[in-house]
Structures are given as C-alpha cells and as structure tokens.
Amino acid sequence: MNRYVGNLPAMPGVFPDYPAPVVRNAGAERELVLMRWGMPPPPRTGGPPVTNIRNTSSPHWRGWLKPENRCLVPFNSFAEYAPEPNAETKKKDVVWFAINEDRPLICFAGICTEFKGDHGTKSKPIPGPHQVYGFLTTSPPHQHRTHALQQLAALFDHSVGAFLKAWPSR
C-alpha cells in the first residue's frame, strides 16, 4: 500500500467537510490519502455536500460505484446524535458506538471522487479541486428502525478486498 499522508496526529473526531484518512484503489495497489468528507450533491437538488449515500440506484450515484471510486474509511468508534433532545438540556446528546470495548480498527464502505467546486462555508469558501468521499449506508435492521433512518455499511477484514474490487451482486 502506498502511504502519502505520512504520520497522522491523533484525530479526536472526523466531521463533515473536514479531511480524514481514506484508503482507495490506485491502479493495482491501494493508497492511504486525506480526503474531505462530503460528496457533490445531485445538481437538481443542490445543497451541502452529501455525507451518507443510501440510494445507490439513483443515477447521480451509480457512476461512482465502480471500483476506481470505492474507498474505505478506517475507524474504531463513531458518534451520532440521539434521535430526540435530552429532557434536561433540550439538546440532542452525542451517542458513541464501537464494535466492542476493545475498539478494533474496521472500515466504513464509501465512494470517492474529485470535486472541482468550492467546499467550506459561503463566507470562507475553499476553492477546488478537492478529493472527497461519502459513506455508503443501508436500511437499519428492523429492531433499530425507530431510532435510525440508515445504517452505515461497516466492512471487516474478509470483506474489504471484495468491496474494493467488485460491487456485490444484488
């Protein structure tokens, strides 16, 4: 694997529109690069960069499902906001998730591309081009549907290579 990002400092979190380490295909090898979290939105709807992609049958996303646009986003834990505000603070709590207490390194499945437009805020745009990525998601298991609208697609050792080479048949 080619590693172009050098030694990275500890990252306490990764946030939309900020860089994060991502593994992608580079010819016959894989490389670790920094990419900005957020794919270009569909042109008809516009809006902010898209962080989570669920409808992979959409014409907007289909072009990025090829192996050359697949990526892995390594993590050992992640957070989401609680579905309802906390009764005391009136704000949504941040809820952390991990595979287990040891927090082993695993990966989210994603897609990536080069985006030539601006990222950042309207008052402080960051001109492109940008290497960007988004997570692939799926419907949550039935028992979690009351809490989550989507579930991130996590990959383990045995499925990483298969995902980067070919899209699973449906």
Image (cartoon, rainbow, N blue to C red):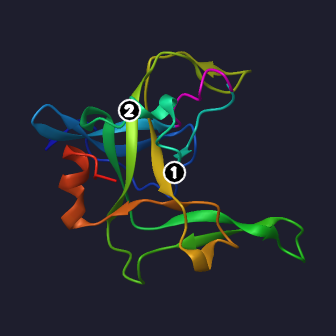
The relative height of residue 9 versus residue 119 in the rendered view (above or below) is below
Percent coordinates x, y for residue 169 in the rendering = 28, 52
**How many labels sit on residues?**
2
- Residue nearer the viewer, 152 or 38: 152
Chief SS of the magenta region: loop
State the SS at label 2.
loop
Residue at the location (56% across, 37% down)?
17
Percent coordinates x, y for residue 46 in the rendering = 67, 25
- Residue nearer the viewer, 62 or 131: 62
**Residue at which label 1 appears:** 14
Mark in front: 1 vs 2: 2
Mark 1 or mark 2: which comes first in sequence?
1
Q: In the image as oriented, which residue stretches furthest toward the front?
A: 170
Q: Which residues are drawn in magenta?
A: 38-45
Residue at the location (33% across, 73% down)?
104
Residue 89 image-quadrant placement: bottom right
Report whether 95 appears left or right of 165: right
Residue 153 image-quadrant placement: bottom left
Report whether 147 appears left or right of 169: right
Query: Is there CB contact under 8 Å for labels 1 and 2?
Result: no
Residue at the location (74% across, 21% down)?
123
State the SS at label 1.
loop
Percent coordinates x, y for residue 64 in the rendering = 38, 32
Q: Tell me if mark 2 has few (under 14), some (14-19) or many (20+) residues whose alpha carbon lies within 10 angstroms of its own.
A: some
Q: In the image as oriented, which residue stretches furthest toward the left?
A: 28
Task: Give me the C-alpha separation between circle 1 and circle 2.
Answer: 22 Å
Is residue 52 found inside the magenta-colored segment of the image?
Answer: no
The relative height of residue 118 versus residue 80 in the rendered view (above or below) is above
Q: Any mark on residue 64, and which?
A: 2
Report whether 62 appears left or right of 66: right
Q: Amino acid at mark 2?
A: Trp
